[in-house]
Image (cartoon, rainbow, N blue to C red):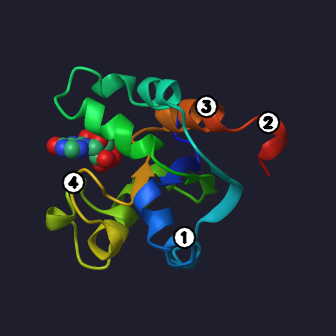
Amino acid sequence: MATNRTFTMLKPDSVEKGNIGAILEKITASGFRIVAMKLTQMTTADAQEFYAIHSERPFFGELVEYMTRGPIVAAILEKENAVEDFRTLIGATNPADAAEGTIRKLYAASIGENAVHGSDSDENAAIESAFHFSGREMF
Ligand code: IDP
Ligand code: MG
């Protein structure tokens, strides 16, 4: 069953570069309502669990290093067709392939340091939201 929520992280590079405000502006201007949000930092164990599906990939160590090196903004977003529409808004994993005007095209440096996360399914949106937020933090 399709839901109307997705989960995002503004990754450490976005926080380091001072892009939180610009990216959030783009997200809300695109019709997403912020349901939950916080500045937080993942531990190595957190990142290994969050990205467990990629544990056999050659870039896994690099990904965990990157995602734990500084704070992130974690958020839950609401909009009709949220998962698919947010993936469209962020653009392709590799910013070199991302469409003009997408968040990754505008703010990502490389396929590894690509500015934002967006859930890839309703099921993963629910799992990832529960990973970062308790029910009392969702509005
Ligand atoms: P997605 O974030 O667009 O869903 P995934 O394939 O699920 O992309 O990969 C998860 C994250 O792992 C990416 O967002 C990126 O940070 C990192 N990543 C993916 N492919 C590579 C790669 O080839 N080299 C380095 N990092 C990668
Ligand atoms: Mg993915």
Can you tell which quarter of the image residue 137 is in?
top right
Instruction: Give the spatial CA distance, label 3 vs label 1.
Output: 21 Å
- Amino acid at circle 3: Phe
Extreme-right residue of the structure: 136
Mark 3 surroundings: few (<14), some (14-19) or many (≥20) residues within 10 A: few
Q: Which one is in front in this view, the residue at disc 4 or the one at disc 2?
A: 4
Mark earlier in primary sequence (2, 1)? 1
Determine which residue is flagged by label 1.
20
Instruction: Give the spatial CA distance, label 1 vs label 4.
Output: 19 Å
Q: Is residue 50 left or right of residue 59?
A: right
Determine which residue is flagged by label 4.
111
Q: Is mark 1 within 8 Å of ligand 1?
A: no
Residue at horizontal 59 percent and vertical 73 percent from the top:
28
- Amino acid at circle 4: Ile
Q: Is residue 28 left or right of residue 86?
A: right
Can you tell which quarter of the image residue 113 is in?
bottom left
Determine which residue is flagged by label 3.
131
Mark earlier in primary sequence (4, 2)? 4
Residue at horizontal 48 percent and vertical 74 percent from the top:
19
Question: Element type at marker 1?
Answer: helix
Mark 1 surroundings: few (<14), some (14-19) or many (≥20) residues within 10 A: some
Residue at horizontal 46 percent and vertical 55 percent from the top:
12
Instruction: Give the spatial CA distance, label 4 vs label 3.
Output: 24 Å
Question: Element type at marker 2?
Answer: helix
Q: Is mark 2 within 8 Å of ligand 2?
A: no
Question: Element type at marker 3?
Answer: helix
